[in-house]
Image (tube, helix red, strand yellow):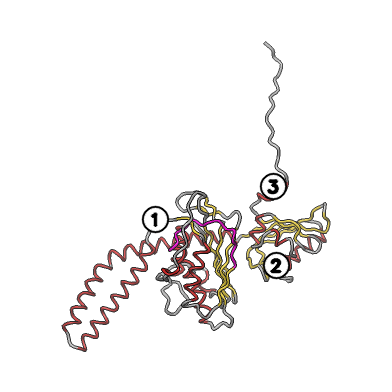
Amino acid sequence: MSLEPKLFSLPITPAPNASVLLSALPVAVAFLDAEDQFRAVNPAAEQFFGLSAAQLLQLRLRDIIAADQPIFLLIEQVRRGGLTVIDYDMNLEGPRLSKHGVTVHGTKVPEAPDGVLLILQDASAARTLDRQLNFRGAARGVAGMAAILAHEVKNPLSGIRGAAQLLEASVGPADRELAVLIRTEADRIRALVDRMEMFGVKPIAREALNIHEVLEHVRKLAQSGFAATLRISEFYDPSLPPVWGNRDQLVQVFLNLVKNAAEAIIGADIPNGEIALMTGYQHGVRVTAAGTGQAMHVPLMVTVRDNGPGIREDIRHDLFEPFVTSKATGSGLGLALVAKIIGDHGGLVEVDSRPGRTEFRIFLPLAPKDAPLREPEDPKSAQEPSAP
């Protein structure tokens, strides 16, 4: 028997090239030349700046971020010292960007002495996901409350209304006025309970939809009614694939957002009031579906932007909580319903607001490739859905 050692050869997997590795990184990476012009970006940087690589490569950093922002001081420190510089919790503000709590790494590249490599980590994404979980929890709380109200309030309320109606027909004019008041208030409470029942936990029927057909329907409803005096602009990506959703519920979502934007502009008497509807594709956006532990790809983004006064700071954090509203006569259920519907779709809601610019960004999943596309709605049958 031979005692000579045997050599075992293990298969060696070739390492991917640098560009492939850069594209796979989940953090934004951008290389700037001596004039701070973009020379290379990865897909995460496209998502971070909200622009495609082709657009970014035509711009300098100061075209996106104001020249007085501290990121430019960091870049100068990198160039002078030739070291890696890190700054935490940095705010990036400019004509095309508004991000807070960003960690910025800047470093030199030996092959390009005047260039700077930036790595940007957006901590606001984690905060957004945390808020999203809070929104879903709030929606579930309203669902439980709605079930209790429907069971415990509707039946006695019907009795009260019936008794008031009988009294109305058998009493004198003075007491009849009180009976009418009781009946009217009973109807109002029942309508509130009916609106809250919309938060109940129910399966949704979904199909492949053209999101632009949904938004066009919403635009027509808005401009024929509450937004007749405002300009509604559309900036759509015509190459978007179908979304996987419930048409009526998505109409409800975007109608609520457009209506809120219109009321904010009109209420503040903003000159040249404008609402913009935008769509785009965001690579790498994934959300874990509640209760499943599975990450769902939600790359289709719809943005509703207005040039109104912005959302008050004191309610911004709790904006999607039930009964939180800045309106004197509002119920505070409209945005809570938006959060619930988008959560039921496995999507994500983001909000960015400051005076003169408020954006609601909705991320939605794509339809399965084999799902048939829903036919466009007949324009003659378009009706505005009831809103809470």
The CA distance from mark 1 to mark 3 is 40 Å
Which residues lie in the magenta part? 235-248
Instruction: Compare marks 2 and 1 and give the one earlier in the sequence.
Output: 2
Instruction: Compare marks 3 and 2 and give the one earlier in the sequence.
Output: 3
Rendered image: mark on residue 371? none
Q: Residues within 10 Å of mark 3 (few under 14, many from 20)?
A: few
Q: Is residue 133 above or below residue 292?
A: below
Identity, as a three-letter code, of the amino acid under mark 3: Val
Rendered image: mark on residue 203? 1
Give the quadrant of the C terminus. Answer: bottom left
Label 2 sits on residue:
64
Q: Say if mark 1 contacts mark 3, CB within 8 Å.
A: no
Task: State yes or no: residue 247 in magenta.
Answer: yes
Q: Residues within 10 Å of mark 2 (few under 14, many from 20)?
A: some
Label 3 sits on residue:
20
Find residue 280 and report its horizontal and vertical position in percent. 59, 61
Instruction: Compare marks 1 and 3 and give the one earlier in the sequence.
Output: 3
In this rendered view, identify the residue nearer to me: 108 or 244. 244
Query: Outermost residue, top direction?
Result: 1
Left or right of 46 on screen, residue 248? left
Left or right of 203 on screen, residue 242? right
Q: Identify the residue at horizontal 59%, vertical 74% (top origin).
A: 357
The CA distance from mark 3 to mark 2 is 26 Å
Find numbered disc 2 in the image and state the secondary structure of the residue it sits on: loop
